[in-house]
Amino acid sequence: MNAAAEGQILTHECPAPACTEQVDPGMLMCPKRWPLVPKPIRRAVWIAWNRGVGAGTPAHRAAIRLAIAAVRRDVVPASSLKHPARGTALVSPPRAGLDSQHRPGGQHR
């Protein structure tokens, strides 16, 4: 008989580097590491999860891969910061006037 059938709660290890915390099956990461994932990517995970309905869908799997890459500090291309199902940007456009104050490469006027 498997563990789930015996009434045991299954867990998995948090995918963040050097974290060995056991996480409930409905959560991707431990509460300490989840906030390290950029908010647009966290949002993509939740949108794709869709209260469990989207679990395992290509959009959900893509969002999970992105979140894990982000917490592992892998390079996350800007093009990935789109809603995995709709293809729309998750980040807000720059506020009016911001472009006139900042230059590419982080240089300020």
Image (cartoon, helix red, strand yellow):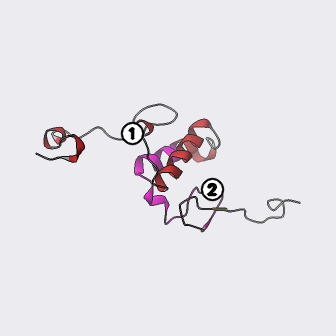
The answer to whether residue 58 is above or below residue 1 is above
Mark 1 / mark 2, whichever is N-terminal: 2
Residue 63: numbered disc: none
Graded by Cα atoms within 10 Å as few (under 14), some (14 to 19) or many (20 or more), the crowding at tag 2 reads few
Q: Quadrant of the N terminus?
A: bottom right
Kindly give the residue lying farthest to the left in the view shown: 109
Magenta-drawn stretch contains 23:
yes
Q: Residue at x 44, y 59 (%)?
A: 35
Q: Position of residue 57 (x, y in %)?
A: 63, 38
Residue situated furthest right in the rendering: 1
In screen coordinates, is 103 left or right of 9? left
| Residues in magenta, as a range | 22-47
Q: Quadrant of residue 22?
A: bottom right
Residue at the spot x=48%, y=31% of the render?
Answer: 86
Identify the residue under disc 2.
26
Q: Position of residue 93 (x, y in %)?
A: 29, 37
Residue 4 on image: x %, y %: 79, 59
Indicate the amino acid at tag 2.
Gly
Cα separation between marks 1 and 2 = 27 Å
Type of the residue with mark 1: Ala
Residue 101 magenta-highlighted = no
Say which quadrant the C terminus sits in.
top left
What residue sits right under mark 1 in the picture? 78
Task: Name the residue nearer the viewer: 41 or 43.
Answer: 41
Q: Secondary structure at mark 2?
A: loop
